[in-house]
Amino acid sequence: MSNLERLNSINDNETWFYGTRDRDERTEMTDQTVLSEAQVCLEKQKPKRSLFDDSLGSFLVYKRQNDALLKCEQEGPMARVFAFEYSIHHPGQRQYLVSTVERFWEWYKKQYDVSFYELIPQNRPAHLYFDLEFYRETNPDVKEEDLIKDFNDCVSEVFMEMFGIDLDPEKEMLVLNASTITKFSEHIIIHLVDNHLFPSNISMKSFIQQLKENMLSSGRCLVWNADATKLITLFDATVYSANRNFRLYLSSKLGKNNPLVLSQRCNFYAHRKHLSRRQIFLDSLVVPASYNTPEIIYIPKVENGEYPDIQSRERKILTISTRVHASNENVVYISGRGPTSPFPVLDQHIIAINRWWKDNASIRQWKLSVDKFTISRHIIYYISNCRFCFNIGREHRSNGVYWIVDLDKLHCFQKCFDIDCNGSSSNYFPLPNFVCTSLSTKDVNLEANQISIQAPNTEVEDKTVGIDNMSKQLLLDVIREAKAMNETEVQKRMSATCQNAILKMGEQKIQEVGTCPN
């Protein structure tokens, strides 16, 4: 018997967590019987209490959630609230157990046929989590493997786009499965490297809305709902509310026979020789049992102290040209992966800059946008394999960096996702003349909801673009010069560069405005 089968099946030497395999064989019970059994099961703890039990914390049941939360707060930081169902005929009715994680586990591991939930407090740092589901009858053509791959790709893209975090789904996703022959159902808890946590489950909403928007705009991870009347995302976007109840590992919904168990596709423990149910239980908690000095992902709050929601955007036409048109009033964007933007010369220039610090630096993702207030046009490059930050003069340990190129002012600068840098950016680096020329050769009309984009021909004369074609000394000079100058002086020099590149004025005209950088 494999380790996974041992964890997910009956063990003769250990009470099985899930109860009898076929619940249909059990006699039907009334609400009062079920409630009585649940209460008796919990009350049985009292006669067996010992100094050891007491040392692990309280073990108290409350009918009202608010009472349980109040008691939990009084008990201190180690106390938690676990909800449980008890009424077959009135699903959703729950009572609340206040205990510590250790005390609860000592009791929970001996139970079977249970329906318990973790109550996620609204102000506790937490792992990002997902509830995935779709009905097989209304989605007969869905290939689970392809759907999961698309989901992992979408989540990874948003992590990089929003936080510069390079997610490895195979290593950082704990996957629990509760699927049946009629419904696909999984829970995913993400364990980011360096113990990164979200400030709370409420703070996850901006990430979730961005993820949902990306899926809807790209047509990925969409499934039909239960009655096949609407396309929805694979994940449930409604499970990020205050004091949300999230089903526990080894629990089923009341009256069901599909407990959450470790998924066969889960590689989270691939390199772990010895694995226990206790470890899976602890890792499956959305709010960690212990924090161990976590890194909290920075998500700014708006004026009222709440976390912002990302408003969905309509599909529009994005016009990139050498002149600004008044019709570009809304924020529109397109994005892609790798060096595939409509500006290949610019792509290679950004890669060349970053390869001064890491030879294998590359573009992970790019995003082209127009600001709805200033009508300014930018392209953002999210960098892979290089985390060098000008603000600290070295690479960050885990947080990524990105470069922003202003397509109007023709300069670029670097920023990072580290909270300690507090949004600081590098000085502005003027784009070389041959890059500016490549940006001004053509107007490019791009559909914001396109999945693939045909890049225009932007070759500059007979010059082959690459790191070897760019003067290394010129690049070093630009960097040194930008670091030594203040922003005002750099802006003056960039203004001269813009006029030279876009308007193609003669040398005499350029000298009237200012001296171009070498």
Image: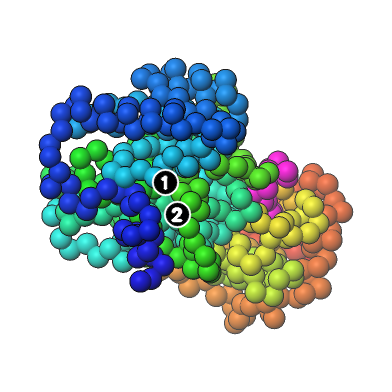
Q: Which residues are magenta?
A: 410-424
Quick one: label 2 or label 1, which is nearer the N terminus?
1
For badge 2, the amino acid type reads Arg
- Counting other residues with Cα less than 10 Å from the Cα at mark 1, is it few (<14), some (14-19), or many (20 or more)? some
What is the C-alpha distance between the residues marked 2 and 1?
A: 8 Å
| Residue 517 located within the stretch drawn in magenta | no
Give the residue at mark 1. 109
Magenta highlight on residue 416? yes
Q: Residue at 84% across / 59% down in the picture?
A: 481
Q: Quadrant of residue 334?
A: bottom left
The answer to whether 197 appears left or right of 228 in the picture is right
Residue 30 or 190: which is nearer the viewer? 30
Residue at position x 45%, y 65% from top?
A: 267
What crowding class fits label 2: few (fewer than 14 Cα within 10 Å), some (14-19), or many (20 or more)?
some
* Residue 401 sits above or below residue 359 on the image: above
The answer to which quarter of the image holds residue 351 is bottom right
Q: Position of residue 184 (x, y in %)?
A: 25, 54
Which numbered marker is on residue 177?
none
Identify the image quadrant of the C terminus. bottom right
Which residue is at 54% across, 33% downward?
50
**Quadrant of the image containing the N terminus:** bottom left
Looking at the picture, does residue 99 appear above or below residue 418? above
Q: Decide: marks 2, 1 in contact (CB < 8 A)?
A: yes
Identify the element where label 1 is drawn: loop
Left/right placement of residue 489 relative to residue 172 reads right
**Quadrant in the rendering for residue 467:** bottom right
At 45% from the left and 69% from the top, the residue drawn is: 456
Question: What residue is shown with label 2?
Answer: 277
Type of amino acid at the residue the image marks with label 1: Lys
Q: Horizontal placement of 28 versus 188: left or right?
A: left
Label 2: state its secondary structure. Answer: helix
User: Which x, y percent locates residue 311?
Assistant: 42, 36
